[in-house]
Image (tube, rainbow, N blue to C red):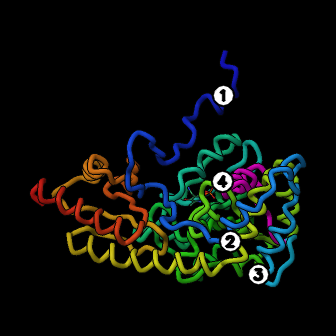
Amino acid sequence: MPLARSAIVRIAGYTPGEQPRDRRYVKLNTNENPYPPSARVAAALRSFDPARLRLYSDPLATDLRRAAAQPLGLGPEWAIAGNGSDDLLTIAVRTFVDQGGALAYAEPSYSLYPVLADIQGAAHVPIALDARFDPPADTAAQAARARASLLILCRPNAPTGNACARESLEAICHDFPGVVWIDEAYADFADDNCLDFVQRFPNVVVSRTFSKSYSLAGLRLGLAFAHPDLIAEMMKVKDSYNLDMLTQALGLAALEDRDAMLSNVQRIRATRGRLVAALEAMGFAVPPSQANFILARPPRAIAAGALFRDLRERGYLVRYFDLDRVRDYIRITIGTDEEMDGFVQAVGAILRQTGG
Ligand code: PMP
């Protein structure tokens, strides 16, 4: 007899993007930021007194939550902090989905969502995105019909990069009777966002991460915003000390220098435009991206899986998902201009070799 719950034994678990140590790659596979975090973060790290670590961290991360909510004109009771936004997604599923209940999520989207349903012992309610990878008009009806209590939508969506119209998300938030979680991990790279929804809808949560725009993937810090009633329920579920003291201090420093983040975002958006133009000129199809990555379908001469492997041999690591609707594409994280120039050259060389 297996020792673990059958729901766990049955599943494969989530597969994160590779973090290889065998050789140096240009890492374009996990949507990390190619630029370092703010100099204020570096200064806060240097001046952190290790003697402080003797004591527990603030279990409520109040200073960080206050600093995060303040630009919205809100108090800390509107925010919860997590050990990465993955931690917040786990908290969400444990807070809002019963064992034996149902979790609705878009597909294709972030592949962690169905894994969290499995761990909770909840049913999957995948909602197929339309041809442009936007949620269909009857998303709320589909999720409600399947008795889902939580609906997770990602905007801009991963791994497709597109941001659906705000109005269509607004309608979904209005119509769905349960909680709508809007995963905005990539929103800093987009033209607009849905953070204002949390003040207009009592059933909406918007999550953010410091892993992408703030260049702090290794620190593990995420935030979610919602009406204080929803935040209060999630605070009961989180680990008591889910944010260590160093993360709270460095996260605060990062928030104090939003300009550094925004200037990196501007550079990445400009590089994104140049990369898309270069790939389109080589015959790639690229759905419009509002994120720090693009999804790109190579020209007929080469299959996406083969291109992924050839790029890897040349030292460029991108992401390939052998999944319905995206298996003809590779996903490329936006690096520096220099990295992207090398990448485009490598793609060109591979295409010439295959006669494309
Ligand atoms: N949401 C989406 C859509 C993501 O792509 C990621 C990164 N894999 C996350 C959430 C989680 O990011 P983190 O836990 O680093 O905040």
Q: Amino acid at mark 1?
A: Ser
Mark toward the viewer: 4 or 2: 2
Relative horizontal placement of residue 121, taking residue 139 as reference (left or right): right
Judge by depth and name the residue closer to the eye, 353 or 114. 353
**Element under disc 2:** helix
Q: Residue at x 12, y 54 (%)?
A: 353
Q: Residue at x 58, y 65 (%)?
A: 215
- Establish if 40 lies above or below 5: below
Q: Residue at x 43, y 63 (%)?
A: 333
The numbered mark at residue 200 is 3
Residue that badge 2 annotates: 40
Question: Marks 3 and 2, Cα distance to the nearest angstrom?
Answer: 34 Å
Rendering quarter of residue 284 = bottom left
Dots 4, 1 in contact, CB < 8 A: no
Instruction: Mark 3 or mark 4: name the one nearer the start of the chain.
Output: 4
Residue that badge 1 annotates: 6
Judge by depth and name the residue closer to the eye, 317 or 164. 317
- Ligand 1 closer than 8 Å to label 1 CB: no
Relative horizontal placement of residue 199, taking residue 186 as reference (left or right): right
**Element under disc 4:** helix
- Establish if 112 lies above or below 170: above
**Element under disc 3:** helix
Question: Marks 4 and 1, Cα distance to the nearest angstrom?
Answer: 23 Å
Mark toward the viewer: 3 or 2: 2
Mark toward the viewer: 3 or 4: 4
Question: Marks 4 and 2, Cα distance to the nearest angstrom?
Answer: 25 Å
Q: Amino acid at mark 2?
A: Arg
Instruction: Mark 4 or mark 1: name the one nearer the start of the chain.
Output: 1
